[in-house]
Image (cartoon, rainbow, N blue to C red):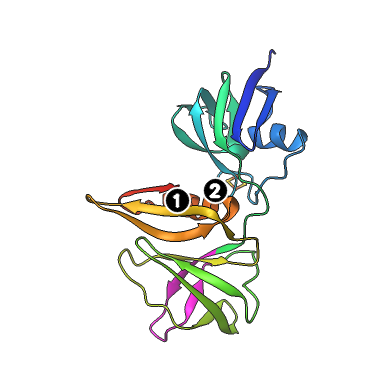
Amino acid sequence: MAGHRLQVQQPGLDIIVSPDKSLLQSCTESGMKLSQSCRNGNCLRCEATLVAGQVTLRDGRRLNAPANIPLCISYPASDMVLESLPLSRQGSYWHAQLTSKGDWQLAAGSQPPPQLGQRVAVLQATRVDPSRVDQISGRHVRLAPPVTLTGSGSAFLIALSAPTRGNLALWHKRHLHPQCLWSNLSADTGQLALSLCRRAQWPGQYWLD
Ligand code: FES
């Protein structure tokens, strides 16, 4: 079967991809190291934004641009353009809930918890707080300084071990006023934070600038 042209804006990539291979597989075979885990469309670590073209998902559904697509279950259905790729240097993250004792309980999963002393950022719908892991018990983590839960009641802990400094900022707009949530981000950390905001489906609009 004839291939399709895949262009990626950031990092620059221009390759021919087979409709029989997932975009994750094709990009990996072209030498890109991409963030991934479940490979069945659940964890969204491999999510990318389709800005032109269309893909067929593993279950047969067709998605047209603009759309956020998990690369592991997306197959080319036309020539396509992706905004960027989720490079594997992105940091680790955990979905977390604040308990009544002031600990953060990490969602169940195979990913080990962060290390004692690990620098983290708590990402919520309308704020980001830097902190550090002060105590760990199983999947319960205590942070210092402590971070309170606001707004939607859900949050992500992002490990800051990967390179995080850069010239991007994460923005949010719910009503009229744009609000900068997190500044001086590297492309990897910014993309991860943006993916998590979209995954959480918090109200409002998020973007990187
Ligand atoms: S690797 Fe989990 S959604 Fe693609």
Instruction: Please identify the residue farthest to the top as the structure is shown.
Output: 2
Depth check: 192 or 68 in front?
Answer: 192
Judge from the rendering whether residue 48 lies leftward or rightward of residue 88; answer left or right: left
Asked if residue 23 is positioned above or below residue 197 in the image, the reply reads: above
Question: What residue does disc 2 label?
Answer: 44
Dot 1: element: helix
Which amino acid does the dot numbered 2 rest on? Leu
Snapshot quadrant of residue 164:
bottom right
Looking at the figure, which quarter contains the N terminus?
top right
Snapshot quadrant of residue 139:
bottom right
**Quick one: label 2, few (<14), some, or many (20+) residues within 10 Å?**
many
Which amino acid does the dot numbered 1 rest on? Arg
Q: Residue at x 59, y 64 (%)?
A: 109
Q: Marks 1 and 2: CB-CB under 8 Å?
A: yes
Q: Separation of disc 1 and disc 2 at Cα?
A: 8 Å
Question: What residue does disc 1 label?
Answer: 199
Spot occupied by residue 154 in the image (x, y as percentages of width and height): 39, 65
Spot occupied by residue 34 in the image (x, y as percentages of width and height): 68, 45
Q: Residue at x 65, y 47 (%)?
A: 87
Q: Residue at x 25, y 52 (%)?
A: 177
Spot occupied by residue 53 in the image (x, y as percentages of width and height): 51, 22
Depth check: 37 or 144 in front?
Answer: 144
Instruction: Please identify the residue farthest to the front as the structure is shown.
Output: 167
Task: Please report whichever mark, 1 or 2, sits nearer to the chain's N-terminal start.
Answer: 2
Judge from the rendering whether residue 177 lies leftward or rightward of residue 157; answer left or right: left
The residues colored magenta run: 94-107
Spot occupied by residue 91 in the image (x, y as percentages of width and height): 62, 60
Mark 2 C-beta closer than 8 Å to ligand 1: yes
Asked whether residue 72 is drawn in magenta, I would say no
Depth check: 14 or 42 in front?
Answer: 14
